[in-house]
Image (cartoon, rainbow, N blue to C red):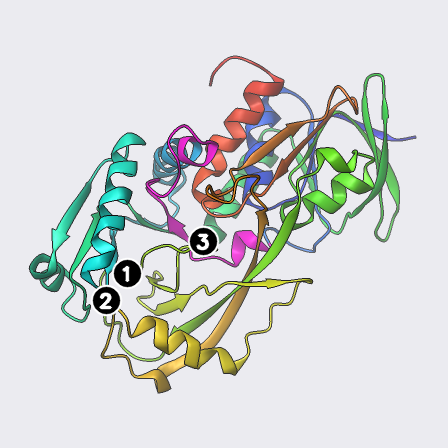
C-alpha cells in the first residue's frame, strides 16, 4: 500500500527544504531526496552570497523573490542563529567604458527596491579596498554572506518539528497521476510508492529530466543547459574585507572574490557549458582565473591560487536572447493532477529560497503568512 501525504517535495536542496518548511504546518509533508545528504548539489556548491537584488529585470520573479527573500533570510537567520555577515559588495569598473553599465545596474537596483546602493569613484574605491584597481564601482551595503550548511540544517529542523519527514537516498524513478493527486515510484534500497495530493518538483539540476520522467509534455519543459563553475581558494591572508565583483556577463556574475566565515578568500565561478555533472576542478583553469582576477586586483600572486570546488547551475535558455531567463514555476495540475515544477533555479536561488517557498505555499494553500 502506498504511503500517503498531503504534500510531497522532490529535492532536499535549500529551495526544496524551504518549500517543505512552508507547507508542513498545513498538512502532512514528505521530502524525498536521491542523495545521502541535504543540499549535495547547487545548494552547497555556490558562493554563499546573500544577494541584494539589483542584477535582475524589474518585476521579474528573480528580482521580486531576491529582494523579499533577502529580507526573509536575514530575519530567519536572526531567529535560528544562522551565521550571516553583511560585509557589502563592490562591482568594479575596470575602465571608463564600463561606468555606464554600473549606472544601469544602480538604476535597476533602485527600480527593484534595493536599499544601500551607491556609485563611488576611484578614490572612495581605493579607500574601501586598497588592493583593488578600478575607475569606479557600485557599492552595495545590503549584500553579505550566509552559512548555507547551517541554513539547510535549520530548515530541516523546522520541517521535522512540524511533523514532516525527509527521506534520503530515495530517488524518484517514475510516477502517474490520479484524480486526487500524484503517485511517485521511489527507488533505492527499499523501492516503494508515495501518493501526494500535491507533488512539487524542486529537483534543481534534475528538474527538467524528472518532469519528463513524470510524463510532462516536452513542450511544457523549458530547454536548459548545465553550466559548470569552478572555484579557487587563495592561500594566505585575504587582500579584501568585502566581496569584489567584475561586471556581470551573459553566463553569470563573473569570476569574483568572496570571503567565508573563517576569512578565507575564494575566487569564482567561471562558466562553461557541460553535458554532464562533473565536480572536478582541473589545475589548467588557473591561468584563465588569474587573467580575470588581475583586471581588478593587479597584485595577485597566481601561485597562491589553489583548486577548491566546483558547482553546476541549471540555466534555462531564454526565449529572448536580449534578456536573461527568469525563474520558472510551472503548474502542471491541469495536465497532471497535483504536479508543480520549478525550473532554472540558479543564482540568486539561495537568497530567494524562502520567498520562492512562500510563492509555492500561496499557490497551494492560499492566503499570506
Mark 2 neighbour class, 10 Å CA radius: few under 14, some 14 to 19, many 20 or more: some
Residue bearing mark 3: 250
> Could you tell whether 73 is left or right of 275 in the image?
left
Which of the image's four quarters has the N terminus?
A: top right
Q: Main secondary structure of the magenta part?
A: loop
In this rendering, the label closer to the viewer, 3 or 1: 3
- Disc nearer the start of the sequence (3/2): 2
Identify which residue is drawn at 18% across, 64% down: 134
| Nearer the observer, 149 or 113 | 113
Identify which residue is drawn at 32% across, 41% down: 54
Q: Is residue 14 visible?
A: yes
* Quadrant of residue 246 within the rendered picture: bottom left
The x and y percentages for residue 285 are 48, 77
Check if residue 143 falls in the magenta segment.
no
| Nearer the observer, 56 or 16 | 56
Element at label 2: loop
Marks 2 and 1: in contact by CB < 8 Å?
Answer: yes
Q: CA distance from mark 3 to mark 1?
A: 18 Å
In the image, residue 172 sits, relative to residue 282, either above or below, namely: above
Mark 3 neighbour class, 10 Å CA radius: few under 14, some 14 to 19, many 20 or more: few
Check if residue 53 falls in the magenta segment.
yes
Identify which residue is drawn at 47% across, 45% down: 350
Q: CA distance from mark 1 to mark 2?
A: 8 Å
Instruction: Read off the magenta span.
Output: 40-64
Residue bearing mark 2: 240
Residue bearing mark 1: 244
Outermost residue on the top side: it is 367
Marks 2 and 3: in contact by CB < 8 Å?
Answer: no
> Could you tell whether 319 is left or right of 220 in the image?
left
The x and y percentages for residue 293 are 32, 72
Amino acid at each position: 500500500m502506498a504511503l500517503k501525504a498531503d504534500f510531497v517535495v522532490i529535492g532536499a536542496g535549500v529551495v526544496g527544504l524551504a518549500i517543505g518548511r512552508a507547507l508542513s504546518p498545513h498538512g502532512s509533508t514528505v521530502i524525498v531526496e536521491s542523495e545521502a545528504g541535504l543540499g549535495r548539489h547547487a545548494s552547497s556548491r555556490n558562493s554563499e552570497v546573500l544577494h541584494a537584488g539589483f542584477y535582475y529585470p524589474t518585476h521579474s520573479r528573480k528580482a521580486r523573490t531576491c529582494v523579499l527573500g533577502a529580507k526573509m533570510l536575514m530575519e530567519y537567520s536572526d531567529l535560528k542563529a544562522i551565521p550571516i555577515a553583511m560585509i557589502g559588495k563592490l562591482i568594479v569598473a575596470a575602465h571608463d567604458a564600463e561606468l555606464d553599465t554600473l549606472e544601469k545596474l544602480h538604476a535597476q537596483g533602485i527600480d527593484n527596491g534595493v536599499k544601500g546602493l551607491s556609485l563611488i569613484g576611484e578614490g572612495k574605491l581605493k579607500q574601501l579596498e586598497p588592493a583593488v584597481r578600478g575607475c569606479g564601482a557600485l557599492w552595495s551595503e545590503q549584500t553579505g554572506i550566509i552559512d548555507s550548511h547551517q541554513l539547510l540544517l535549520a530548515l530541516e529542523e523546522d520541517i521535522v518539528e512540524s511533523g514532516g519527514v525527509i527521506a534520503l537516498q530515495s530517488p524518484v524513478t517514475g510516477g502517474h497521476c490520479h484524480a486526487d493527486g500524484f503517485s511517485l515510484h521511489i527507488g533505492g534500497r527499499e523501492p516503494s510508492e508515495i501518493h501526494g495530493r500535491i507533488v512539487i518538483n524542486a529537483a534543481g539540476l534534475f528538474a527538467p529530466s524528472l518532469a519528463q520522467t513524470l510524463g510532462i509534455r516536452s513542450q511544457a519543459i523549458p530547454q536548459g543547459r548545465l553550466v559548470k563553475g569552478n572555484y579557487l581558494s587563495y592561500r594566505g591572508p585575504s587582500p579584501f574585507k568585502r566581496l569584489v565583483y567584475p561586471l556581470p556577463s551573459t553566463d553569470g556574475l563573473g569570476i569574483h572574490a568572496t570571503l567565508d566565515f573563517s576569512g578565507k578568500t575564494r575566487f569564482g565561478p567561471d562558466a562553461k557549458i557541460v553535458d554532464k555533472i562533473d565536480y572536478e576542478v582541473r589545475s589548467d583553469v588557473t591561468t584563465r582565473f588569474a587573467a580575470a582576477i588581475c583586471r581588478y586586483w593587479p597584485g595577485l600572486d597566481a601561485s597562491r591560487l589553489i583548486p577548491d570546488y566546483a558547482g553546476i547551475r541549471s540555466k534555462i535558455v531564454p526565449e529572448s536572447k536580449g534578456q536573461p531567463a527568469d525563474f520558472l514555476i510551472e503548474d502542471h495540475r491541469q495536465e497532471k493532477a497535483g504536479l508543480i515544477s520549478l525550473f532554472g533555479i540558479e543564482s540568486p536561488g539561495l537568497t530567494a529560497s524562502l520567498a520562492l517557498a512562500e510563492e509555492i505555499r500561496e499557490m497551494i494553500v492560499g492566503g499570506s503568512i
